[in-house]
Image (cartoon, rainbow, N blue to C red):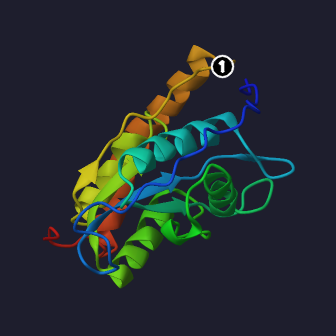
Amino acid sequence: MTAKCDNRPFPTIRRHPPARGQRRAGSGRRDYIVIFGAAVRPGGRPSPALRLRIEGALAWARDHPAAMLLPTGGVGAHGPAEALVMRRVLVEAGIAASRIIVERHGRDTLESVRLCHRLLQERGDCRRVICCTSRYHQPRCALLFRLLGYRVVIPDVPRRMGRLSRRSYGRMVAREVAATPYDGLLLLLGGDAAETLA
């Protein structure tokens, strides 16, 4: 059963000065808030699941103004890319565009993690990865990033069932139980796993 779309506006984020010790680019390592994609509705509206993931990211961004945001997700049933929808909503909520790095090609969880890993390697200043996604999805995302050597934080992401039935939610949890070791094995066999980052 499809969850009812929530059209409430996102809370506006007040601008904060950079945290001490991170005022200049490259002056230190920083957190990256990775926001995993979910369905986009016709017209480019975020689905309820995607809204909750964005809300979790906004909460962390408000409390950690030096953190960067990394939305990830390609084009699903309805365009534009999930990452571009997230970027638009983040900017509308008050996040500076300079804090957002977009990964718009990931088609599934594993591909998103791999593509984000490449971006983070290129930047070379990641201190921790903050996994902003649905709660049932967080363990898999966290495991994959940890296998790549990242320090990972699992933040408190809002959870509202809406019209989603318990049976549907149970199926999603069961899918994660199966997909987590499978994706972990693929990551290891693919040679992406690395030593723990400093």
Residue 8 in the image, given as x and y percentages of width and height: 73, 31
Q: Residue 11 falls in which quadrant of the image?
A: top right
- Please, what secondary structure does the residue beneath circle 1 have? loop
Residue 61 in the image, given as x and y percentages of width and height: 43, 50
Residue 153 in the image, given as x and y percentages of width and height: 28, 47
| Residue 35 visible in the displayed image | yes
Q: Residue 155 falls in which quadrant of the image?
A: top left
Q: Quick one: label 1, few (<14), some, or many (20+) residues within 10 Å?
A: few
Comparing 181 with 59, the one in front is 59
At horizontal 45% and vertical 35% (from top left) the residue drawn is 157
- For the N terminus, the quadrant is top right
68 is higher (above) or lower (below) than 42: below
At horizontal 32% and vertical 50% (from top left) the residue drawn is 142
Residue 57 in the image, given as x and y percentages of width and height: 48, 47
Give the number of marks. Answer: 1
At horizontal 67% and vertical 63% (from top left) the residue drawn is 84
Query: For mark 1, what is the residue?
Result: 162
Q: Is residue 158 left or right of residue 44?
A: left
Comparing 37 with 181, the one in front is 37
- For the C terminus, the quadrant is bottom left
| Residue 178 visible in the displayed image | no
At horizontal 44% and vertical 39% (from top left) the residue drawn is 176
39 is higher (above) or lower (below) than 168: below
The furthest residue to the front: 17
58 is higher (above) or lower (below) than 70: above
The furthest residue to the bottom: 122
Comparing 156 with 72, the one in front is 156
Q: Is residue 151 left or right of residue 68?
A: left
**What amino acid type should be assigned to the residue bearing mark 1?**
Gly
